[in-house]
Image (spheres, rainbow, N blue to C red):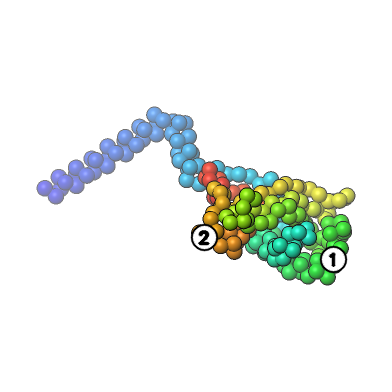
Amino acid sequence: MYSDFNKYRYQERIRSAALLALLVLTLGAGGCQFLGLAAENAMGVAVKPQYRGLEKQSVAIVVYEDASTMFTYPQAQQEVSAFVAASLKKHLPKAHILDYHLVLNYQNANPNWDVLPMKTLGRHFGVARVVYIELLNYTVHSQHTTYVLQGDIQAHVVVYNMKIPGHGEVFHTTINAKWPKSGPLPGYNTDANTVRMNTLQRFSTLLARCFYTWHDRENGYAN
């Protein structure tokens, strides 16, 4: 009986293999497309970087905030620098990201630094690229009322190349990050610090995606 059972299992395996081979032959290219779609759904759609020029380069992060933002959120410049530096290091491991504290110290020691060409700053720090972030909005309160919270960080981002003639601008875009993405939260359900940290994370993620290939699973939050 044991021998008959093994023979039965062997025959079942042969039939299964034959059916699988027949299915692949029948589907042909369609089968390959099906497998490709399945993989795409699992991994997400690859989104190519808008600019590849930060790879294997030395990079300084320079953040500008106006007087109003500095008065309301005196930590904004440092927080944006820290989050963006961490995100770039994570996703561009072959790039050398300059310690952002060096830039902050220079800005504090030179109040009129913002009138200097970015190439001057880049050469001062001995880097090949400068990522300049001009904050346009930085808040954790809804535009409609201060009783609900929703982080909103908007910035104009420009990359400067120190090695080409002229002003050196090679890439620019605008980043607009909101958290929660779905809408404001009542103040009693969260706190301003949590909202700010999540918004900074969202902002730095969106900014870094400009420079590396990531996979979109249709929710905008994939890596």
Q: Which residue is mark 1?
A: 111
Decide if residue 152 is on the left or right side of residue 29.
right
- Badge 1: how crowded within 10 Å, few (<14), some, or many (20+)? few
Residue at the outermost left position: 1
Of residues 169 and 20, the one drawn nearer to the viewer in this rendering: 169
Tell me which residue sits at (50%, 59%) in the image: 189
Q: Please give the label number shown on residue 140.
A: none
What is the three-letter code of the residue carrying label 1?
A: Pro
What is the three-letter code of the residue carrying label 2?
A: Tyr
On the image, the x and y values in percent for residue 6 come to 19, 47
Tell me which residue sits at (63%, 45%) in the image: 48
Of residues 90 and 175, the one drawn nearer to the viewer in this rendering: 175
Of residues 183 and 85, the one drawn nearer to the viewer in this rendering: 183
- Badge 2: how crowded within 10 Å, few (<14), some, or many (20+)? few
On the image, the x and y values in percent for residue 111 come to 84, 66
Picture quadrant of residue 98:
bottom right
